[in-house]
Image (cartoon, coloured by chain):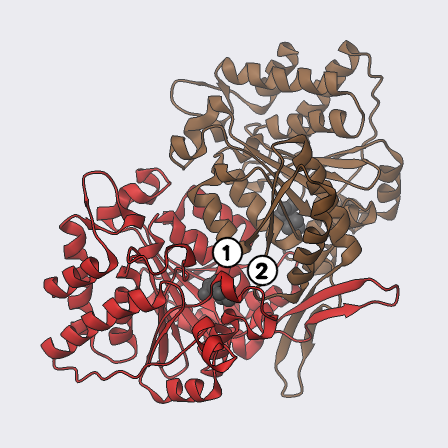
Chain colours: A brown, B red
Amino acid sequence: MILPGDGIGPEIVEQAMAVLEVASGKFNLGLSFEQGLIGGSSIDVHGEPLTDETLKAAGECDAVLLGAVGGPQWDTLEREIRPEKGLLKIRSGLGLYANLRPAILYPQLADASSLKPEVVSGLDILIVRELTGGIYFGEPRGIQTLENGERQGFNTYVYSESEIERIARSAFEAAQKRSGKLCSVDKANVLEVTVLWREVLDRLAPEYPDVELSHMYVDNAAMQLVRAPKQFDVMVTGNMFGDILSDAAAMLTGSIGMLPSASLNESGFGLYEPCHGSAPDIAGRGIANPLATILSAAMMLRYSLNMSEAAEAIEAAVSKVLEQGLRTADIYTEGSQKVTTAEMGAAVVAAL
Amino acid sequence: MILPGDGIGPEIVEQAMAVLEVASGKFNLGLSFEQGLIGGSSIDVHGEPLTDETLKAAGECDAVLLGAVGGPQWDTLEREIRPEKGLLKIRSGLGLYANLRPAILYPQLADASSLKPEVVSGLDILIVRELTGGIYFGEPRGIQTLENGERQGFNTYVYSESEIERIARSAFEAAQKRSGKLCSVDKANVLEVTVLWREVLDRLAPEYPDVELSHMYVDNAAMQLVRAPKQFDVMVTGNMFGDILSDAAAMLTGSIGMLPSASLNESGFGLYEPCHGSAPDIAGRGIANPLATILSAAMMLRYSLNMSEAAEAIEAAVSKVLEQGLRTADIYTEGSQKVTTAEMGAAVVAAL
Ligand SMILES: CC(C)[C@H](C(=O)O)[C@@H](O)C(=O)O
Ligand SMILES: CC(C)[C@H](C(=O)O)[C@@H](O)C(=O)O
């Protein structure tokens, strides 16, 4: 299922679909696509950011490729029907608890980082973020009026052992496939919910003797990501800390327009989307970077569709266009060639 | 009241006291000091990280200067009597809701940052963090066993309007004294408690027409701090987000050993402490950087004791020793002169 969403979503998804179609032909994948609405574009048509029908249809597909949601025109709506709720609904509705967010520095784009080259060169971190629990979904939540007449807002940060265990296993397994180093991030010196988090990680660790587990407080993790990010390989954390740290980590590369993400359920079914947002400020101008979405499509082929050959070919094609010096505005530096969204997409297709 | 605490705490506080004593003589401040125990050193003596007597005595002083708390030898204790609880107890017990954390890049130390010089040169951000509420103190909290036998951890992220209002006013006032730019950080697209946060900030804004208020989601804020930190002047946020963002911001400077902090209550009474922790790995070796504590002492003179002349003199003395090329190990770079904790303290005293 293809869910272009809002803002630059439709533009970047269009390029990813073109790449998928060519890959499908070349590798005989027999891909077929169904399109649906999510976010503001769904609100405009259906009055809600994700209909139950679209959710159901998405669940019946083999995988979902999403653009991005949100924009200022929907910001004044009531909270319950804002674009973001569509995203939260599909994550939760399809049980996509394991959010994999790589932060990779492309050697061709090393200049784009705000960090010194020696600090980030070769950076390759995978953040595993719990995506269907924690404070994002915890109850009770709301705004209530106290006896003294003033209002009070409240949310609940909650995890059960089984929720922690399944995301921990995703992270241990990811670490096994990489360098065998896993850092779990919590705030166990203050928050009981993360005391339990740490306990569960420690309990599981002996089952993964090839993985070296460490723990770090979230404030220190934010600091270490800035100071010396290459100390990390796989990081695992809850929904809220993961939201913050994965964005910080992505920005270390200077090229958030390059980073894909996968959100998986127990059976490997997944939703794939770029790490960046819907960028309403540049929507419709044909200058957005489609590569994060194209790389998300490659992740989709690998993780959900078992088509790693095609995934690798797409990733190689992306590398090639970067080698050729093609850059959308967000990653442009002097001396390279500035291209539009469509030109970038076409170049990847050609490189395939 | 002087609370040296644990790890490097006693070493760095000793230097700050020496500086304060000399300043007291020079400017006729008539300072006198009382010492108390907090953190692990209090646990060792009293079995708890902060006694009610020490808390009371601290509240009766004009201000509190604290070193740092914590260390591995207390990590296996029950949660309720860990060193950190002493810190949380004094913050809450004395109503120190306004935590001011500057992130300043010292021009002499520009090399120490992991960011490119052009990204951070001249960096001067003030993070105003709410310190006595939010998820740090919210009830209910704990770990419970569910009907199905598995355990569940939970914490409550809660703010009332009046709690938000008083920290917002601290931030608006700080912004008035600086560039007039205030960025409030929340996650209003997901968390109701921060929807209320945003509302209260917006409601107060017209009372501060000389301050330009903006809002930013916490994930974006973490990203923007890495990408282009100089876009910020004053940032205000809740306890948990403030913990994370202030550490990230501090690390942008590369010199967390240089950064002081103040935690104030309604009447300007305050606790002053370095932004860094107790660094148990280097404790007792005489190599810790005392400058953050010395600068915290200067902040104390300015904010709580109304002795800005002496505060400025101390800050000037710190600048001078940096100019002289003196560096503790944490900020050492080739070509400068490596000094011990005591030598650095003595140099500041001499420069005074
Ligand atoms: C849009 C928002 C609800 C979402 C989140 O906070 O999860 C986004 O920031 C993300 O990280 O995918
Ligand atoms: C030690 C810990 C409880 C504390 C906090 O989280 O507030 C520390 O990280 C800080 O920022 O002062």
Mark 2 surroundings within 10 Å by alpha-carbon count, few (fewer than 14), some (14 through 19), many (20 or more)? many
Q: Is A92 on the left or on the right of A134, as rendered?
A: right
Taking the spot 40% from the left edge, 68% from the top edge, the residue there is B6
Residues at badges 1 and 2 in contact (C-beta under 8 Å)?
Answer: yes
Q: Is residue A82 visible?
A: no
**Location of mark 2 (residue):** A187
Q: Amino acid at mark 2?
A: Lys
- Helix, strand or loop status at disc 1: helix
Residue A267 in sight: yes
Which mark sits nearer the N-terminus, 1 or 2?
A: 2
Q: Is mark 2 within 8 Å of ligand 2?
A: yes
Residue located 30% across and 39% down the image:
B117
Q: Is residue A325 above or below residue A189?
A: above
Task: Quadrant for residue A210, please give it.
Answer: top right
Tell me what residue is drawn at x 29 percent, y 57 percent.
Answer: B289
Location of residue A45 by image quarter: top right
Residue named by callout 1? A219
* Image quadrant containing the C terminus of chain B: bottom left
Q: Position of residue A240 (x, y in %)?
A: 63, 54
**Is ligand 2 less than 8 Å from the beta carbon at label 1?**
yes
